[in-house]
Image (tube, grey):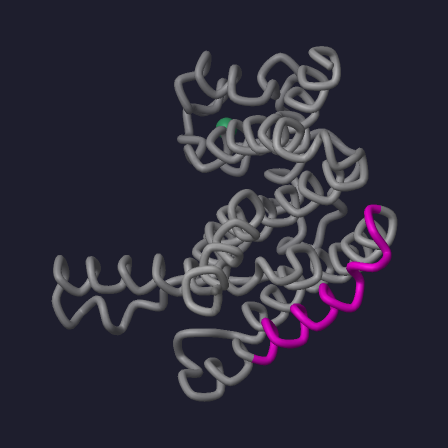
Amino acid sequence: MIVAAVFLTLLGFALGSFAGVVAFRLPRGESPIGGRSRCDSCDAPISPRDNLPVASWLLLRGRCRSCGAAIPIRYPLIELALGVGFLASYLAFEDEGAAEVALACAFLFVLAIITLTDLEHRIIPNVVLWPASIAAFALVALADAGDLPQHLLAAAIGGGVLLLVSLAYPRGMGMGDVKLAFVMGLFLGRAVAPALLIGFAAGAIYGVALIARHGSEARKQAVPFGPFLAFGGVVGLFAGDEIVDWYVDSFFGG
Ligand SMILES: [Zn+2]
């Protein structure tokens, strides 16, 4: 059990690092697999010892060894978050079986890539969403095939709600967000409802804070919405079912 927990944590760190590679290369039209990673500024190849998740960033104090260019802190943060997230997935879902743990880890990995690509390039790539949909479908089928209709319905409703929002408010939300909500529904099932609500709330709070700080200038700034949806997705993954149960009990229970 300890072995599995340690293994998954290390796998999370490694996949967090891979998420950074995918997010960096995909929008540039490069294959995420194979080839050495290079510095974005000076093009120097990054040696394996400078490519360790989290640790290398700390040892290098967030700078390239060759040219000293800053390495954005979001990379080690995503690596750390995915390591912790994989461990949390193991602890939360281990008693429900390996497929449930894999479903949670796959979801977190997808959210990590999308958070980075949306922050950096304002895109939520289809090449990530397609395999994510297939993985979600397959893992839900493995975990409990009887859950599939509920997850498909959640995907349709989640995507549908965001489609309506994007039509009403095209500046604030793109088709990438709509498709992400669909994928979140596939992974989460009914827990997608609190996930989307929390994502909207977090985005709204951030928007209000931005306007309070920068005035009307902030209104013109396009803020990527994917990371807020991803945040809602994480809360939905670990607490969504409890939130739905609490809501149903409070408002519809005896
Ligand atoms: Zn460099």
Q: Position of residue 78 (x, y in %)?
A: 52, 35
Instruction: Identify which residue, 247 or 189, lies in the foreground.
Output: 247
Q: Could you tell me if residue 191 is visible in this image?
A: yes
Instruction: Identify which residue, 90 or 77, lies in the foreground.
Output: 90
Instruction: Identify which residue, 195 or 213, lies in the foreground.
Output: 195
Q: Residue furthest front?
A: 254
Q: Position of residue 205 (x, y in %)?
A: 27, 59
Q: Position of residue 194 (x, y in %)?
A: 48, 60
Report the magenta residues as a range.
Answer: 143-160
| Lateral position of residue 12 relative to residue 139, left or right | left
Instruction: Identify which residue, 8 or 94, lies in the foreground.
Output: 94
| Lateral position of residue 241 relative to residue 95, left or right | left
Q: Judge whether residue 152 is colored magenta.
A: yes
| Lateral position of residue 97 relative to residue 104, left or right | right
Q: Could you tell me if residue 115 is visible in this image?
A: no
Residue in the image at 72% along x and 36% along y: 101
Q: Position of residue 35 (x, y in %)?
A: 77, 33
Q: Quadrant of residue 163?
A: bottom right
Q: Judge whether residue 209 is colored magenta.
A: no
Q: Quadrant of residue 213?
A: bottom left
| Lateral position of residue 124 relative to residue 103, left or right | left
Residue in the image at 62% along x and 43% along y: 108
Residue 95 lies, with reference to residue 136, above or below; the image says above
Residue in the image at 52% along x and 15% along y: 55
